[in-house]
Image (cartoon, rainbow, N blue to C red):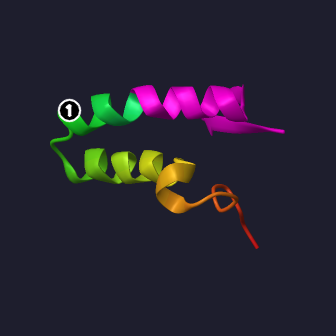
Amino acid sequence: MGNVFGGGEQSLCLSNGGTEAFIDVLMPAVSDLADDVWDYRFEALLTRQDQNVMGRGTVGFDL
């Protein structure tokens, strides 16, 4: 089981542990650099990928 992050024609496939490490490193960096509305929305998107914030089993779940 893993996660795929895509943008344009590029995509990044990570395991659950890889995704957790990736998000844990990105969140503080994005928080420090946020200036525009888009930056804050991107930070919120990253935060929603953190299972410690959203709760176990709810990240990436769609109906």
Residue furthest out toward the left: 35
Residue 19 on the magenta segment: yes
Question: What span is colored magenta in the figure?
Answer: 1-25
Q: Residue 6: x percent and y percent? A: 64, 36
Q: Is residue 39 left or right of residue 55?
A: left
Q: Quadrant of the N terminus?
A: top right
Q: Residue at x 53, y 27 (%)?
A: 22
Q: Residue 8: x percent and y percent? A: 60, 34
Residue 8 visible to the viewer? no
Q: Is residue 30 left or right of residue 57?
A: left
Q: Residues within 10 Å of mark 1 (few under 14, many from 20)?
A: few
Q: Quadrant of the C terminus?
A: bottom right
Residue nearest the observer in this picture, 58 or 60: 58
Q: Residue at x 42, y 26 (%)?
A: 25
Q: Is residue 20 left or right of residue 1?
A: left
Residue nearest the observer in this picture, 43 or 25: 25
Q: Residue 29: x percent and y percent? A: 29, 28
Q: Which residue is mark 1?
A: 33
Q: Which amino acid, mark 1? A: Leu
Q: Is residue 62 left or right of residue 54?
A: right
Residue 62 on the magenta segment: no
Where 36 sits versus 5, above or below? below
Q: Residue at x 38, y 53 (%)?
A: 44
Identify the secondary structure beneath mark 1.
helix
Where 7 sits versus 51, above or below? above
Q: Residue 43: x percent and y percent? A: 35, 46
